[in-house]
Image (cartoon, helix red, strand yellow):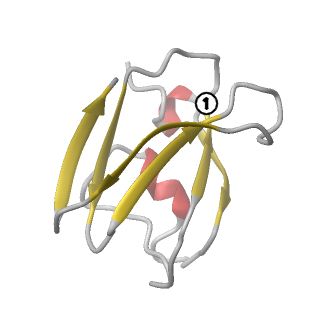
Amino acid sequence: MDLTLDEEGAQVTAASSYDSNYPPKNILDGEQSTKWMTTGSFPQEVIVQLATTATISRVKTWSTNAKEVLVEICSGPTPNKWERLFEMSMPQPCEDTVGF
């Protein structure tokens, strides 16, 4: 089960940029053909809230022109205490799954 899909109740609660043609919620549909497009300035961030508490064992990304990806988690009721899971440089274009 992919808990980051909108059909599983995940939501984008914050994003650093917005384009109505490529909104942040597109990262939750599981489709490579849709996307979240940013302004191109760095850094960019998006916060995804899962519908339930879960143990995260892998993260899958599809990206173009992303230089680095940093994934952090917050297990509290508000996103104020973050723990880094991983950080990596990205080849271009990139589809990657990181397990931990």
Marker count (numbered): 1
- Of residue 84 and residue 66, the one placed in the foreground of this image is 84
Q: Residues within 10 Å of mark 1 (few under 14, many from 20)?
A: some
Relative to 98, 10 lies left or right: right
- The residue nearer to you, when weighing 25 against 48, is 48
Towards the viewer: 91 or 15: 91
Image spot of residue 46 (x, y percent): 58, 57
- Residue at (39%, 26%) from the top-left corner? 2
Q: Quadrant location of residue 74?
A: top right
Query: 65 above or below 79?
Result: below
> Measured along the vertical axis of the image, is residue 72 above or below residue 33?
above
Residue drawn 53% across the image and 61% down it:
24
Amino acid type at mark 1: Leu
Residue 38 placement, left or right of 35: right
| Quadrant hosting residue 100 | top left
Residue 96 screen position, x and y as percent: 21, 45
Q: Residue at x 70, y 25 (%)?
A: 75
Residue under label 1, please give it. 50
> Horizontally, is 81 left or right of 42 in the view?
right
Above or below: residue 76 compared with residue 61 = above
Residue at x-position 26% and y-position 69%: 64
Dot 1 falls on a residue whose secondary structure is: loop
Q: Is residue 50 left or right of residue 87?
A: right
